[in-house]
């Protein structure tokens, strides 16, 4: 079920009414309702894959109980590896089997040996990369004795399958989300209203910004040989706003929806395109994944505590694995490696923690230095997005070669410019709102801000008008729908 679908527009208020007006007096009934609702939400796409998430949940639930009872370290490690093997095994088969089979065959081709790669004709289950990491974090934290395992199977299954963030995150830690299922939730009008604002902003990002930028990004990337280098730069910028609006829009809707039910999820995006260096960008982009890799992979490998070689090795591993997590394609691996190259100089010069405050804090306009730092960081990010968007490495390299040709200095395609003027204008308005709200949790948060009521409702009405105006007849899936 998609957040931007008619089905969800009916589903959400129905579950909300049942949750607060029927099951509100019994915490267990509320949690059971959330499990059932989550399975309906997930199974709406393909009910057959419910067996995967149920099995994965059961394995980690019983692994957690086993870890609590077991004191023998060898047996505890065996239990942990059972969880890792099951979760990553599912991920490996469904997401990476064909990639490794084809790469294996290609490797033999280099030596003149031709072998047939047997592909599995399988569909990638939605959200598998997200809930796999969520359940893994539970088992690892229990193993490390950072978290007390739960005996409440309903709460645990609700934690794993919680429908607002099930398909595309944020990837929640059990230490944050699971305890919220144990406590009685009381309806908060202020929290619900702020949640509705965040949902509205998320829908605006997805339907108005992302889906419209996608029209021009897809046109330019799919027909790149017909355009000049300057036009291809515009196509890459369109994609940068497409993926940001799409992915952060999903996170906003997920977090806002959670607040309607009394839950607090972690912020997943913190206005990353206002970053002054790549290190800051990765502290603000897909925060739940970046911190997951930091805590469960980078730090256990030694982090940045060792010598220079270890720092370089760990940095490349973390970024390449992050790229591989995004998809079974060499383009994602190159995208990850490229970001590692961007990040390394900052880390080696110990400047990766230089920009931890909000840009232009306490001021409206950034300094000239801050502006140029943001522009350079954005340019580097856009260049890396070319690999992320390209169908394969050949596509990416051809696209880049045209950019760095003489046509880079020609005027962009006039037809593209004319057709996209309104989208460019709306995107600039979007950027202005995000800039003014850059120290908030989301673009429509009005905490500690007093606006005349007529101004607020006029702005909300304008956003709603644009959402309805640009809503497409055919539902457009989120980019991370099948990651």
Image (tube, helix red, strand yellow):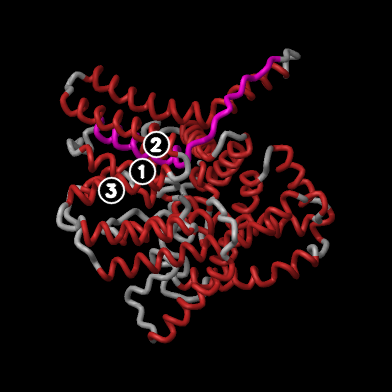
Query: Could you tell me if residue 312 is visible in this image?
Result: no
- 405 on left or right of 69: right
Instruction: Name the residue rendered at 45%, 56% in the picture.
Output: 7
| Secondary-structure class at tag 2 | helix
Instruction: Name the residue rendered at 21%, 58% in the picture.
Output: 22
- 408 on left or right of 443: right
- 102 on left or right of 168: right
* Mark 3 residue crowding within 10 angstroms, few (<14) / some (14–19) / many (20+): some
In the figure, 117 relative to 14: above or below?
above
Instruction: Name the residue rendered at 62%, 62% in the picture.
Output: 212
Question: Quadrant location of residue 323?
Answer: top right
How far, Cα to Cα, is label 3 from label 2?
21 Å
Q: Which mark is residue 425?
A: none
Query: What stretch of residues is rendered in magenta?
Result: 115-143
124 in magenta: yes
Task: Report which residue position mark 2 lands on.
Answer: 50
Q: Which mark is residue 39?
A: 1
250 in magenta: no
Label 1 close to label 2 by CB (< 8 Å):
yes
Q: Which mark is residue 177?
A: 3
Residue 375 percent across, percent down from the top left: 60, 62
In the figure, 242 relative to 95: above or below?
below
In the figure, 460 relative to 370: above or below?
below
Label 1 close to label 3 by CB (< 8 Å):
no
């Amino acid at each position: 079920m998609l957040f931007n679908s008619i089905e969800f527009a009916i589903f959400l208020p129905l579950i909300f009414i049942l949750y607060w007006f029927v099951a509100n007096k019994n915490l267990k009934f509320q949690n059971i309702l959330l499990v059932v609702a989550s399975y309906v939400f997930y199974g709406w796409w393909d009910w057959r894959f419910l067996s995967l998430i149920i099995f994965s949940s059961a394995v980690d639930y019983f692994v957690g109980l086993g870890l609590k009872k077991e004191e023998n370290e060898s047996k505890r490690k065996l239990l942990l590896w059972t969880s890792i093997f099951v979760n990553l095994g599912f991920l490996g088969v469904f997401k990476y089997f064909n990639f490794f089979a084809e790469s294996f065959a290609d490797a033999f081709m280099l030596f003149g040996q031709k072998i047939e790669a047997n592909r599995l004709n399988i569909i990638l289950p939605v959200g598998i990369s997200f809930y796999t990491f969520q359940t893994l974090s539970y088992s690892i934290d229990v193993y490390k004795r950072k978290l007390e395992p739960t005996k409440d199977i309903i709460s645990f299954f609700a934690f794993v399958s919680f429908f607002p963030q099930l398909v595309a995150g944020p990837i929640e830690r059990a230490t944050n989300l699971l305890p919220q299922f144990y406590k009685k939730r009381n309806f908060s009008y202020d929290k619900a209203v702020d949640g509705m604002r965040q949902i509205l902003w998320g829908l605006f990002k997805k339907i108005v910004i992302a889906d419209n930028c996608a029209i021009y990004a897809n046109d330019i990337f799919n027909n790149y040989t017909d355009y000049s280098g300057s036009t291809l730069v515009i196509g890459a910028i369109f994609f940068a706003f497409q993926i940001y609006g799409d992915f952060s829009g999903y996170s906003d809707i997920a977090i806002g929806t959670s607040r309607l039910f009394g839950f607090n999820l972690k912020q997943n995006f913190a206005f990353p395109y206002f970053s002054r260096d790549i290190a800051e960008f990765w502290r603000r982009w897909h925060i739940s994944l970046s911190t997951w890799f930091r805590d469960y992979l980078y730090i256990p490998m030694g982090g940045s505590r060792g010598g220079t070689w270890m720092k370089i090795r760990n940095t490349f591993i973390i970024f390449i694995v992050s790229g591989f997590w995004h998809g079974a394609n060499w383009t994602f691996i190159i995208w990850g490696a490229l970001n590692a190259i961007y990040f390394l100089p900052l880390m080696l010069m110990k400047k990766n923690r230089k920009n931890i405050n909000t840009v232009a804090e306490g001021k409206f306009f950034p300094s000239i230095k801050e502006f140029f730092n943001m522009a350079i960081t954005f340019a580097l990010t856009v260049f890396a997005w070319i690999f992320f968007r390209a169908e394969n490495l050949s596509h990416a390299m051809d696209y880049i070669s045209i950019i760095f040709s003489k046509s880079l200095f020609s005027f962009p395609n006039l037809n593209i410019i004319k057709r996209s003027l309104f989208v460019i204008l709306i995107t600039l308005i979007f950027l202005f709102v995000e800039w003014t709200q850059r120290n908030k949790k989301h673009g429509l948060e009005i905490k500690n801000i007093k606006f005349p009521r007529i101004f607020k409702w006029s702005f909300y009405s304008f956003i709603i008008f644009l959402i309805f105006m640009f809503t497409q007849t055919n539902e457009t899936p989120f980019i991370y729908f099948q990651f």
